Image: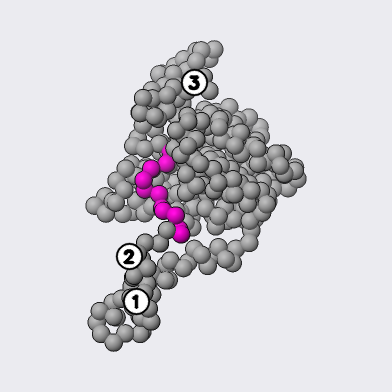
């Protein structure tokens, strides 16, 4: 991409007339000139807000890598529960263990009884899990540092798939694609003449996802527009409305995404917008004194402001669901 500049720190800056939309955890603050000629290359200065892409070093470790501490803790609390104890310390251990099992067993149970996944979703997940993302970034092939944890979660993807079915959507906009797992869920739910348009800033991901989509007949329903999300949204044809929109890109630009959808009248009547990460690790409602990953705080504040803006918008009806990192459903009144 000719408009991309590589920074000495290994990050990327983008020159565009509109603020940059970095995928998922990525973010940047950008300032644009007041005007530019349509036939010239627009310019913008972007200052990175903390990390872009993956928050390296904070991702969860391999699930199979159980530490000796975890093993010892499980062994020492064997047989104890909230109702099975003899002394004070055993009672505390039993209550803590039961709470751990109640919370820690939830995701695995939900996954075990959810069967909405399809062949394209599985193909994307298999490729994603077997891709060496660190190597790709070091080789300069990807614009950001990525990791599988940045993808839409299987439970959430299946939920988005069900929302697509329930809405009876024929044309869907995905703002922020990454590996296309969410897009795969959407196109599996679309009718044969349906269409999912994904926006992503990284040209590598368009080809990466396209290789998988090309293996399935349903892949023809999917198209990718490469570039900053706001730039791409400004070019979408206003006469082709969207029934359903899934937002999962730069957290600092969420408000602007919704504003553009409304300003450009890109939504069909009774359209639904699903916005991901609206609980953002709990940061929108937890004070900074509890931060263990302070570099995320800026995004948490942006999401908190976005949530308040949505809740008080006179034209919008919203409800937040505690699915994974929070999903908010939005409908125009």
Q: Which of marks 1 and 3 is in front?
A: 1
CA–CA distance in space, label 1 to label 3: 58 Å
Q: Which residue is drawn at 57% across and 52% down?
A: 157
- The percent coordinates of residue 156 (x first, y second) are 54, 54
In-front residue for pair 323/210: 210
Density class for disc 1 (Cα within 10 Å; few <14, some 14-19, many ≥20) is some
Q: Which mark is residue 69?
A: 2
For the record, the magenta segment spans 53-64
Answer whether residue 290 is magenta in the image: no
Q: Which residue is drawn at 38% across and 43% down?
A: 56
Between disc 1 and disc 3, whose residue precedes?
3
The residue that label 1 is drawn on is: 77
Q: Residue 62 carries which label?
A: none
CA–CA distance in space, label 2 to label 1: 12 Å
Q: Tell me which colouring the rendered structure shows.
A: one colour
Residue 211 visible somewhere in the drawing: yes
Vertical comparison of 47 with 241: above or below: above
Number of numbered discs present?
Answer: 3
> SS for tag 3?
loop
Q: Do the residues labelled 1 and 3 touch (CB within 8 Å)?
A: no
- The percent coordinates of residue 207 (x first, y second) are 61, 33
In-front residue for pair 307/25: 25
Check the image and name the residue furthest to the bottom: 86
Q: Is the magenta stretch mostly helix, strand or loop?
A: loop
> SS for tag 1?
loop
Residue 244 visible somewhere in the drawing: no
Q: Which residue is drawn at 45% across and 30% down?
A: 20
Q: Which mark is residue 3?
A: 3
Between disc 2 and disc 3, whose residue precedes?
3
Density class for disc 2 (Cα within 10 Å; few <14, some 14-19, many ≥20) is few
Answer whether residue 58 is magenta in the image: yes
């Amino acid at each position: 991409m000719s408009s991309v500049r590589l920074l000495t720190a290994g990050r990327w800056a983008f020159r565009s007339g509109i603020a940059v939309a970095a995928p998922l955890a990525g973010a940047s603050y950008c300032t644009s000139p007041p005007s530019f000629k349509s036939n010239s290359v627009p310019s913008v200065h972007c200052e990175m807000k903390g990390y872009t892409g993956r928050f390296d070093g904070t991702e969860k470790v391999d699930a199979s890598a159980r530490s000796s501490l975890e093993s010892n803790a499980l062994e020492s609390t064997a047989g104890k529960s909230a109702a099975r104890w003899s002394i004070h310390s055993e009672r505390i251990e039993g209550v803590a263990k039961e709470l751990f099992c109640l919370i820690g067993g939830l995701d695995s149970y939900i996954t075990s009884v959810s069967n909405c996944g399809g062949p394209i979703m599985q193909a994307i997940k298999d490729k994603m899990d077997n891709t060496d993302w660190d190597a790709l970034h070091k080789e300069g092939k990807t614009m950001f540092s990525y990791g599988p944890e940045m993808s839409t979660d299987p439970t959430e993807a299946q939920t988005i798939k069900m929302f697509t079915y329930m809405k009876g959507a024929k044309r869907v906009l995905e703002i922020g694609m990454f590996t296309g797992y969410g897009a795969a869920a959407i196109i599996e739910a679309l009718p044969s003449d349906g269409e999912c348009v994904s926006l992503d800033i990284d040209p590598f991901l368009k080809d990466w996802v396209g290789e998988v989509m090309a293996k399935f007949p349903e892949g023809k329903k999917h198209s990718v527009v490469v570039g900053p999300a706001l730039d791409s949204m400004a070019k979408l044809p206003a006469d082709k409305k969207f029934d359903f929109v899934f937002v999962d890109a730069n957290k600092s630009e969420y408000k602007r995404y919704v504003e553009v959808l409304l300003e450009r009248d890109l939504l069909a009547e009774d359209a639904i917008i699903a916005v991901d990460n609206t609980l953002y690790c709990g940061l929108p409602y937890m004070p900074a004194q509890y931060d263990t990953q302070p570099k995320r705080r800026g995004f948490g504040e942006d999401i908190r402001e976005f949530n308040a803006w949505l809740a008080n918008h006179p034209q919008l009806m919203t409800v937040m669901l505690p699915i994974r990192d929070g999903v908010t459903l939005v409908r125009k009144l």
